[in-house]
Amino acid sequence: MKTDVTTTGLPENAYKELQPGEEYRPVMPPESTPAEVTPWSVLWGLLMAMLFSAAAAYSGLKIGQVFEAAIPIAILAVGLSTAFKRKDSLGQNIIIQSIGSTSGAVVAGAIFTIPAMYILDLPVNFYQVFLASLFGGFLGILFLIPFRKYFVKDMHGKLPFPEATATTEVLIAGEKGGKQAVVLIVSGLIGGVFDFIVGSLGWWSEVVTSRITSVGQTLSDKVKMVFKIDVLAVVFGLGYIVGLKYATIICAGSFLSWFVLVPLFHEIGNGLASPLGASAVKLISAMTPEEIFRGYVRQIGIGGIAMAGVVGIIRSSKIIRGAVSLAYNEITRRKSAGAETTVRTQRDIPMLFNVMFILLTALLLFVFFAGGVTFNIFHAVVGLLLVTVVSFLFTTVAANAIAIVGTNPVSGMTLMTLILSSFVLVQIGLTGNSGMLSALIIGGVVCTALSVSGSFITDLKIGYWLGTTPRKQESWKFLGTLVSSATVGVVILILNQTYGFKGPQALVAPQANAMAAVIQPLMSNTAAPWMFYVVGAVIALLMTMLKISPLAFALGMYIPQELNTPLLAGGLVAWWVSSRTKNEKLNNARLSRGTLIASGFIAGGSLFGVLGAFLKFGGFDWFNTAWAASANAEVLGLVMFGLLVAYTIWDSMRAKEE
């Protein structure tokens, strides 16, 4: 059977919903036997995991941003295959990317919580960091495997998977070469240089706000209403791939937060003579819009994400029941129908093994909690239940978030986990330093589990599009997690000794500082902002009633506005280039070329972001702070963003009908 191929080198139905009876055939067909797991792919994958774990840990603790490793690793894998003239290397490159990309996910789980232990002067050792990351990563992989088929196959064409799309385009362009490789390289250089100038040189501002005009400044000062947009090529590229539908929903949630709720809190706060909330120390009337968002409105977004997760779990109940039923049949040695005839590209780790590994991980977690954290069997049991239940329930939320917008709201879900854990631990009598240590370790395990599951769904979607064997991705992901966990444990200890996490010269560690600020009063029986969470939950339910994606809307409420608005710009461009004629084939060709360009922006921006992080680590800091913070730099940033948009439209419209 011959497969039609677009200008991107993928089957033409790769990004479309399948019609009844239609089948998606990947680049490497099921009946083929490509080289995947080899000494070359495993060794390079592990090396990438170590290097990028160290780089991502420093970047995340220094500036609060953990760069996504999947795309840079895919680029390096393609480059290595080309340099060493390896033929038919696509399957091996997928394994390199899959093993190596564990680094960013494990790092995000660790640095959001573990440094808070240093900040709170709690005892920390290597084994706590290593084991919390390792067991969390294992749970993230194991809980996601039963849902692989649903997210990557059953939902084919219904979810955009922006990061997976960009990484897939990199891998396929490297394999096939030709025109699509040229388009990807050119757009990658444009996006990479653009973002490097913004992030590492500061020639123009990354974030443009309405404060550059006198009217905008007045609105910000008087009613706390401000518009913001991030001009990075990588975020704009994500918006193009996300598409107009989800970008609109995300921005609607963001606009509710910034144009309704922030001004509303300001109006209410103007009449208050004391701070609002038990932990607040500043009057609302003295707050900037950003401070109101972080202090109050974002908590509503957290409640929305939590309720969206509950809604998603209810909607996925049939899928969950199917996974449980399959596990039961495996355990009782009843082979499910068709299990032995499953094609190569749909073979997972056997469910029996998956369940056994979950039980083994849970047992080891219990031993870890009882022997190295709580030193109490009852408290260890409670901690284990919190970790497993929350990780399992929010696994689908993390995967869905990545599939929709390419951003995992792991910090918000971890914050909710810390609040829930602290509440439960206080009720069973675990307070003070012991309670804070236990809650942070629990939060670290959950945070890593959700971060890894969100990242892993990207790897599995890449494998689905290209035709790798899921079982091989799943099996070797554990080794990548092991190496990444050990690396991040060593790096955090070294960074603490070198820079520290407290004091004027310390690493910023913004997420960990936020976790520390939240958990300390909770362990002192100070009330959490439950009403804000309830409001967010109600909003998510209303979106569900209106048949609007509650998760996409809640993500918009939670993620800062400047990261949402460029998604809408990208979505509008995607709609524009694909709707200018009545010739559907020409529209599709333009959309496909634009997808390749957007993928180049994401790839280039990510790779040059890694370069910028390494340069800063080496002491090369050329950022023009004073100029980048000026209004003129914002104006220039807006002009350059306009040129980036114009280039995308122009180049996309050059596509020819195949």
Image (cartoon, helix red, strand yellow):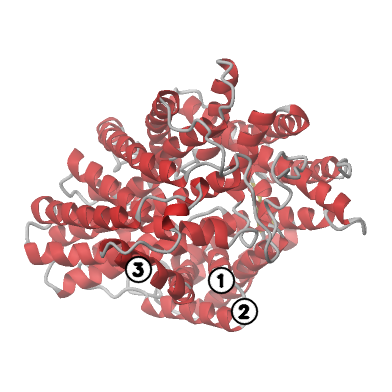
Give, as a three-letter code, the residue at label 2.
Lys
- Mark 1 Cα shell of 10 Å, populated few (<14), some (14-19), many (≥20): many
Q: Which residue has dot 3 on it?
A: 324
Which one is earlier in the sequence, the residue at label 3 or at label 1? 1
Residue projecting furthest to the top: 84
Asked if residue 138 is positioned above or below residue 192 in the image, the reply reads: below
Which numbered disc, 2 or 3, marks the residue closer to the eye? 3
The answer to whether 477 appears left or right of 135 in the picture is right
- Mark 2 Cα shell of 10 Å, populated few (<14), some (14-19), many (≥20): few
The answer to whether 151 appears left or right of 657 in the picture is left
Identify which residue, 35 or 505, lies in the foreground: 35
Distance from Cα at disc 2 to Cα at disc 3: 28 Å
- x, y percentage for residue 234? 63, 43
Q: Say the numbered circle drawn on residue 429.
A: none
Distance from Cα at disc 3 to Cα at disc 1: 43 Å
- x, y percentage for residue 432? 14, 62
Q: Quadrant of residue 637?
A: top right
- x, y percentage for residue 58? 39, 35
The answer to whether 425 appears left or right of 603 in the picture is left
Q: Residue at x 78, y 50 (%)?
A: 591
Asked if residue 643 is positioned above or below residue 443 in the image, the reply reads: above
Asked if residue 98 is positioned above or below residue 450 in the image, the reply reads: above
Give, as a three-letter code, the residue at label 1.
Val
- x, y percentage for residue 166? 62, 43
Q: Which residue has dot 1 on it?
A: 262
Asked if residue 624 can be seen in this view, the reply is yes
Q: Say the numbered circle drawn on residue 547.
A: 2
